[in-house]
Image (cartoon, rainbow, N blue to C red):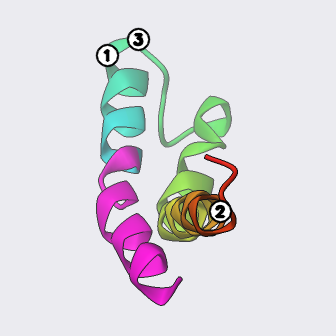
Amino acid sequence: MSEAYGWGKFLFIPIPWFIDLGSRLMGINVYGVEGFYIPYFYAMSDQIGANISGLISSAKKKGHG
């Protein structure tokens, strides 16, 4: 489980970069109110990824996936 958690942290860390880039390309002011969601993904991307990969690992060990 801890290995899956670590891989999730490693793999999901670049996700906010793509969200930020996509927002900039769509013309959203990432420093203004309309870009309020971007700091959340920078702060939580590793935790989100770790939780997702942990759940997948747990499901595989139980035989559900």
The residue type indicated by label 3 comes to: Met
Q: Secondary structure at mark 3?
A: loop
Measure the C-alpha gap from mark 3 to mark 2. Answer: 33 Å
Report x, y in % for residue 33: 67, 37
Q: Residues within 10 Å of mark 2 (few under 14, many from 20)?
A: some
Q: Which residue does the numbered mark 3 point to in the structure image? A: 26
Q: Secondary structure at mark 1?
A: helix
- Residue 3 in the image: above or below residue 63: below
Using the image as rendered, state which of residue 35 and residue 10 is in the foreground. 10
What are the residue bounds of the magenta stretch? Answer: 1-15
Q: Residue at x 64, y 43 (%)?
A: 37
Query: Are the residues at dot 3 and dot 1 in contact (C-beta closer than 8 Å)?
Result: yes
Q: Residue furthest front?
A: 63
Using the image as rendered, state which of residue 54 and residue 60 is in the foreground. 60
The residue type indicated by label 2 comes to: Leu
Query: Are the residues at dot 3 and dot 2 in contact (C-beta closer than 8 Å)?
Result: no
Report x, y in % for residue 59: 66, 59
Residue 9 falls inside the magenta stretch: yes
Q: Is 27 placed left or right of 57 in the picture? A: left
Q: Residue at x 59, y 69 (%)?
A: 61
The residue type indicated by label 1 comes to: Leu
Q: Is 38 placed left or right of 51 in the picture? A: left
Q: Which residue does the numbered mark 2 point to in the structure image? A: 55
Q: Residues within 10 Å of mark 1 (few under 14, many from 20)?
A: few
Measure the C-alpha gap from mark 2 to mark 1. Answer: 33 Å
Residue 17 falls inside the magenta stretch: no
Q: Nearer the viewer, mark 3 or mark 2?
A: 2
Report x, y in % for residue 14: 30, 53
Q: Residue at x 41, y 14 (%)?
A: 27
Q: Which residue does the numbered mark 1 point to in the structure image? A: 25
Q: How many marks?
A: 3
Between discs 2 and 1, the one toward the N terminus: 1
